[in-house]
Amino acid sequence: KEGGLKGKRLGWYTSARGSHFKVDTIMQHAVNFLRSQGAEVIEIDNIYSREVGSLSFQVMLYEFKDGLNKYFASLGENAPVKSVEELIEFNKNDSIELRYYDQELLLEAQKKGDITSKEYLDALEKMNRLVREKGIDRVMKEHNLDAFIAPTGSPAWKTDLVNGDSYTVSSSSPAAVSGYPNITVPMGYVDGLPVGISFFGRAWSEPLLIGIAYSYEQGTKYRKAPQFLPTLPFEGVN
């Protein structure tokens, strides 16, 4: 709505700043716009402890195994694989696939027990406490924030089967790990590729986040309708 940014206190999550100069530049323009509309922007370099990363990885391994096993079980008796263990063996026999992609995560997940195990439940409880009560909730209360802002991610990168992914910016972890709401809208373009700005905050703050994001989106109107580029000539093929 009109004037929806006035008086809002926003925490600029700067953990990825310095990783991509062009994204940094566009993000600074976004911050300048927010301030011009009456929002107060406070820089926040950290939300929670480093331990959250290792805890969330352990939780992911348990839930990855559990989710895949449940999915395979739902496919019926004729499914080519019926468990993560069988999937690992199936992949070992696919030399083309494993030429480019290993299955380290599958192997690590297979070592885990089920999601009733004490290790999983303890990791989940501690992770939630550190990222919620002692993380997002604490920082927002200390700085009286309405929401956090951050660049959503790097512009899309080329597929590289040798070196793998090459993105340098990502701000999805706080909301993803906590389970709290997150919304992204267009922020601009890097060499013609779109980049977004994310707005995230405490639990059940969806109406507030949507209002802030909508005001930013309507005030900047960066979105361009996607379109197909002309097909490149493909010579030498009969």
Image (cartoon, rainbow, N blue to C red):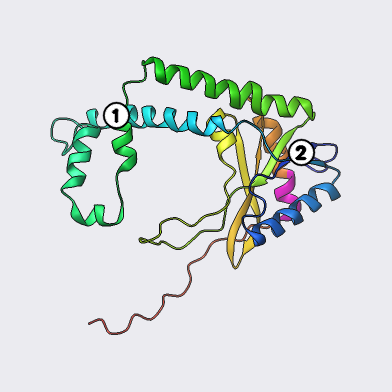
Q: Position of residue 109 (x, y in %)?
A: 33, 32
Q: Position of residue 23 (x, y in %)?
A: 65, 57
Q: Position of residue 36 (x, y in %)?
A: 85, 50
**Residue type, mark 1 in image:** Lys
Secondary structure beneath label 2: strand
Q: Which residue is mark 2?
A: 10
**Residue 46 left/right relative to 153:** right
**Residue type, mark 2 in image:** Leu
Mark 2 in CB contact with mark 1 (< 8 angstroms): no
Q: Which residue is mark 1?
A: 111
Q: Nearer the viewer, residue 162 or 65?
A: 162
Q: Residue at x 41, y 61 (%)?
A: 159
Q: Quadrant of the N terminus?
A: top right
Secondary structure beneath label 1: loop
Q: Nearer the viewer, residue 71 or 98?
A: 98
Which quadrant holds residue 118? Answer: top left
Q: Nearer the viewer, residue 207 or 110?
A: 110
Q: Nearer the viewer, mark 2 or mark 1?
A: 1
